[in-house]
Amino acid sequence: MNFDPRFSGRKFASVGTRPIRPDGVDKVTGRARYGADFNMAGQLVGRVLRSPHAHAKIRKIDTSKAEALAGVKAVITAADLPDLTDGDAAMYDILDNCMARTKALYDGHAVAAVAAIDARTARQALKLIEVDYEVLPHVTDVDEAMQHHAPLINDTVFTEGLEEKPVKPSNVTKRSQFGHGDVHQGFGHSDFIVERSFKTEQTHQGYIEPHACVANVSTDGTADLWVCTQGHFVYRQHCAQLLGMEASKLRVTSSEIGGGFGGKTHVWAEPVALALSRKAGRPVKLVMTRDEVFRASGPTSATSIDVKIGARKDGTITAAEATLRYSAGPYAGSWAEIGAMTAFACYRLDNVKTVGFEVLVNRPKTAAYRAPSAPMAAFAVESTVDELAKELGMDPVEFRIRNAAQEGTRSSYGPVYGPIGIGPTLEAVKVHPHMKAPLKKNQGRGMACGFWFNFGGQTCVDLNIGMDGSVSLAVGTVDVGGSRASLSLVAAEELGIDYSQLKAIVADTSSLGYNDMTDGSRGTFSSSMATISAARNAIKILRERAAQMWDISVDDVVWEQGHAVAKGEKHGNLGKLSLKEIAAKSGTTGGPIAGHSELVADGAGVSFATHICDVEVDPETGSTRVIRYTVVQDAGKAVHPTYVEGQYQGGAAQGIGWALNEEYIYGKDGRLQNAGFLDYRIPVCSDLPMIDTQILEIPNPNHPYGVRGVGETSIVPPLAAIANAVSNAAGVRMTHIPMSPPRILAAIEAEREG
Amino acid sequence: MVEVTLWGALATTAGGKSKVEVEAKDIRELFRKLAEQYPGLEPWIDRGIAVAIDGTIYRDTWSKELPPGAEIFLLPRLAGG
């Protein structure tokens, strides 16, 4: 990579300002096109038949009656999506999740699909497909699935990561362990030890827009896919591999996205739509219903976590230990591993040990959800930290400040930290007016910290300068949180032009080199790095063109505030040339002017946040209302502060729903009982207070502007902050998320009864 | 020669060693030598391993040099949301 990503400490003209969002008008007027807004001539309606059983062997599927129905153009089963994964276990799991092969592994697992001339015919056709199931025993609870007598979901799974190779298959796919020091010895030096067990229920990302796509496979084998996704290049790779196509023959265009939060990072229905189109010879639109989104697309893990922390009387933590069990759905994952890495990342610990277990259950395939796995671990650890502070008689903020990690601290997951922001977020919270505001009867305050890694990845950007001097920026990271605006600010900063001269788009997969998806809070971090690089490459050409126009050496031309300037006494009578003037002459100075960049953005800085929350709990009903909420988070550098604040507020809002209401409820039959927004309640505006934000800027040394990711960390502290607030308001420690009214009432009554 | 620290699960595939010494100038050579010395590590490298060099995590820049005396940690290559 011929690009120096080190933080330069420059002063900014555009970055850090708050221009109006470029996608706003189209979104509020309904003109923006989402996944289901695209249509093609001759398009068919795709529908998926799903298993009603949590666990069942598929003996036989008879599609003949459906195929004979007038208006049905294609019916597919797993036979139409043969295994082309060539030993790639992760891709095989994605394939099997898209269309069950020998077994249905959860309620909602796809078993067949149809394409018909309209929705009514497609629904009728689904009813005519006959599936012969042999129903098997199932297990949906993470703790029960670990028991020796639990039904085995996959008898080829043997636990990885054990010192001795197991001889029996298990629902535990992997054990992972992190830490350093000697926790046994550390607890021996403790004056106080708190040990607690916690549970969190499974939640969905709750994106408002369901999965939707239109697939069109031509008779020459090339194809187009219009889709709502967090990563259209990744979807292209997945679909091409699963359908046996060359990637270059499949053009994927990403639509606007109505939320992803990790749930749109791998394919679900897209290979099915392509297979239907291939078989029918016509375009196929496939849109999941909300019921399907809940039953068959990516929820987060349900968890069961034990935490033990010990401290000396002076408030120094001497040892910390956690065992984390995370459900993965019916396929292997690394969710507990991430929980084990993040659990104690906020603290400076001499002795720490975390152990994670990945557990198979008959629930939908677990998908990433905004800082995946970290919120549940933070809930368990930060609740225990609060309890320990209480035992010690210390203020919870002071206790955390005393034990907070800092530059040079060995992290609980291994490496030593560089410059980090946990201390500054805690100091900011300590002096925040929110912490001193009076509370009324039945009200309680809680605070908690959170950590997330942030990632970079493969990135490609094209910057094209038009002959009128306007600039178009083509990026390949899907804009889920306002990155088109922030990347335009970055390009304006480098070129020295006004933001209004730029227009950023998300290019399709045939127009740009490969980009990793928008996950891991990488969109602005990675694409801004590539944008800076592309702009600098364009400036090099602009200088060359100016040198031609002046007939002087390019070495004598510098770029200053959007203009080429001739340097040196001999050029003293030359005026500046603007970008617009140089662009106007581009046709006769060598042709179009553009800057390109292809790079791997690495070194994304880790991120910390501390949240404060006030709640009021009604002791008669157990109902909780959040009355005040404050987010303090390190952004590295806030490129567009309004979007950064939006990310902080969005994470807090999702966390409030997760903490208080959201929960997958399964019946004894293994079927999901609440697959809709009426019974699975996410917070709406009237449920939420104004969420205050405070942006801290501790520069990331591995980005020219100091940018860190900001999208995910904001969902890490809320479960714990709200649990601490509810526990303080209700006078009883809450250990089970969500803290729904029945759970709070039960806890209050149990406390009364002693 | 650099000293490389392995996380718990990875150590079990390297004969229980949590620290190993490798002669390598960059991440690419480190992975190649590790696979040669500890064949059990190869499937893990294929699935994806991140390398923390003095606290900064690198996932894809295999040309990144390993400075003498640097703290080198292998970590799982994680996904985000």
Image: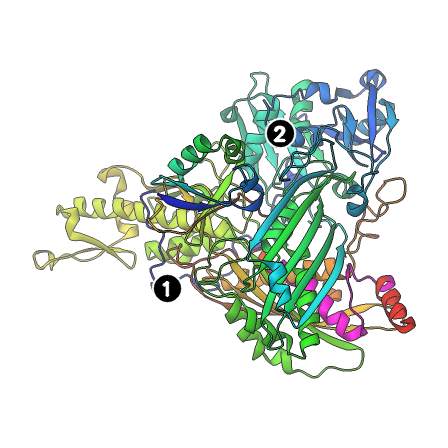
* Residue occupying image coordinates x 63% and y 49%: A261
Q: Nearer the viewer, residue A172 or A193?
A: A193
Q: Is residue A389 above or below residue A86?
A: below
Q: Mark number for residue A89?
A: 2
Residue A237 percent location from the top left of the image: 55, 30
Q: Given the current orientation, which residue lies at the most extreme right position?
A: A753
Residue A27, numbered circle? none
Residue range corresponding to the magenta coloring: A714-742
Q: Residue at x 76, y 31 (%)?
A: A110
Q: Amino acid at mark 1?
A: Ala
Question: Within 10 angstroms of label 1, few (less than 14), some, or many (20 or more) residues?
Answer: some
Does residue A546 appear to the left or right of A243 in the view shown? Answer: left
Residue A66 lies in quadrant = top right
Residue A586's x, y, as percent? 27, 42
Q: CA distance from mark 1 to mark 2?
A: 49 Å
Point out the tag, 1 or 2, that comes first from the N-terminus: 1
Position above or below: A374 against A459: below
Check the picture and name the quadrant holding the C terminus of chain A. Answer: bottom right
Q: Which residue is mark 1?
A: A13
Q: How is the image coloured?
A: rainbow
Q: Is residue A656 left or right of residue A239?
A: right
- Please report the residue visible at 57 percent of the width from the left and 25 percent of the height from the top: A241
Which chain contains the residue that carries disc 2? A
* Residue B5 in view (yes/no): yes
| In the image: residue B37, left or right of residue A642 | left
